Amino acid sequence: MAEEKKRSSFWTKPNKKWLLGIPLGGFVMLAVGAAGLQIMNTILHETSKTEFCLACHSHTVNIKPEYEASGHANNTLGVRAECAECHLPSMEDRWIHYVMRKMVVSLDIIPELQGKITDPADYEAHRAEMAKATWIEFRENDSEYCKHCHKAEHMVLENQGPMARRRHQMSMEKGGYTCIDCHQGLVHKLPEDWEKVWDEVVEETSGSRKGPELAAADE
Ligand code: HEC
Ligand code: HEC
Ligand code: HEC
Ligand code: HEC
């Protein structure tokens, strides 16, 4: 009996001045949340800049000169593809996925700190393994990042060279191909023995098309 009385008094309305705490608390939480989002946004933005990537990837000496020499860094149009545009999902479409991917890139810091890649020879020794991880990602996401800029449906095939026209036509008709199947090594030097690595990539991902086989496919 006494027990019940205690409980019911616990659930009676608290003093009026405490009730004010509810909207106030809600407001404080909202403000903290908004500030948190702003900070996260800034971090995501800053860590998406090419300079951030190059902080680690240029001292390996390989990436920066290879990138600068590529048509994706300097070209007649003056349109540049930044590292993040080819290696991270775009902010607008899937920012949850983006944050997850960020966390994976952030893990890069661990081998970096362990001194895994400290000079060009190290880089060469790891290039195949890193290119392989990247190719697998592109095969699995259907070259999603290339499509941040290139849309097959907006290509004017008639204006392309005969090789490009033939292959693009064929890949659209037959289906099952993705950009990376035919466009490896656009920005970075290919690893030694890359075709062997590519075969492993094809084996480990869905689908059965092989880049090097394509030469025969449309003849
Ligand atoms: C803190 C240093 C550091 C920063 C900053 C960094 N990376 Fe890396 N990155 C590495 C290291 C070290 C590896 C090799 C990791 C391994 O083999 O496990 C790597 C590997 C990679 C790979 C190879 C594929 C893979 O998943 O292993 C890609 C692609 C890559 N980084 C892209 C980027 C991009 C794009 C940025 C900028 C948004 C970036 N990195 C920022 C150190 C860094
Ligand atoms: C940020 C936008 C952007 C992204 C992302 C991008 N490209 Fe490009 N790409 C361009 C521009 C701009 C050119 C034209 C360069 C020129 O005029 O030489 C180009 C040129 C090309 C060319 C012509 C050859 C060359 O190197 O100039 C190929 C092939 C190509 N891109 C394929 C790809 C593939 C495959 C991907 C994904 C791995 C990709 N692009 C990602 C903007 C982009
Ligand atoms: C079946 C093979 C194949 C596939 C798949 C393919 N391409 Fe190509 N592409 C070629 C060939 C071959 C060329 C001409 C040689 C070159 O530039 O590498 C070419 C040329 C290009 C060019 C330059 C066109 C020009 O007129 O200069 C761009 C840009 C390009 N491809 C983008 C893409 C994108 C983006 C995808 C995915 C949506 C893609 N390609 C899928 C084979 C392919
Ligand atoms: C046009 C798209 C594109 C741009 C721009 C680009 N990459 Fe890549 N990156 C790729 C592709 C595709 C691969 C897979 C290997 C290949 O085909 O060369 C790759 C591979 C890599 C690798 C694995 C090791 C290797 O050499 O293959 C690293 C690390 C990397 N990129 C970092 C960067 C950094 C840092 C930048 C900016 C300075 C950058 N990438 C710019 C498309 C791009």
Image (tube, rainbow, N blue to C red):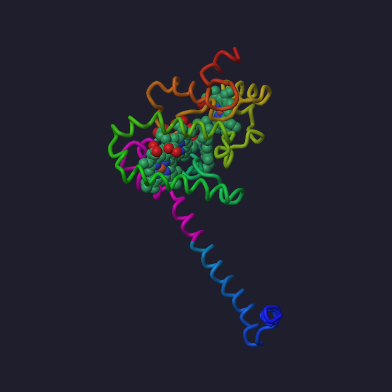
Write the residue at 57% across / 74% down.
28
The percent coordinates of residue 17 (x first, y second) are 63, 87
Ligand 4 in which quarter: top left
The quadrant the N terminus occupies is bottom right
The picture quadrant where one finds residue 165 is top right
Image-based side of 205 in relation to 131, left or right = right
Closer-to-camera residue (29/120): 29
Write the residue at 55% across / 27% down.
205
Q: Is residue 53 magenta?
A: yes
Q: Is residue 87 magenta?
A: no
The picture quadrant where one finds residue 20 is bottom right
Q: Give above or below for 164 relative to 74.
A: above
The percent coordinates of residue 37 (x first, y second) are 54, 62
The percent coordinates of residue 85 (x first, y second) are 51, 44
Q: Give above or below for 92 relative to 161.
A: below
Instruction: Please identify the dominant SS of the magenta region.
Output: helix
Image-based side of 101 in relation to 57, left or right = right
Which segment did they paint magenta?
40-68
Q: Is residue 52 visible?
A: yes
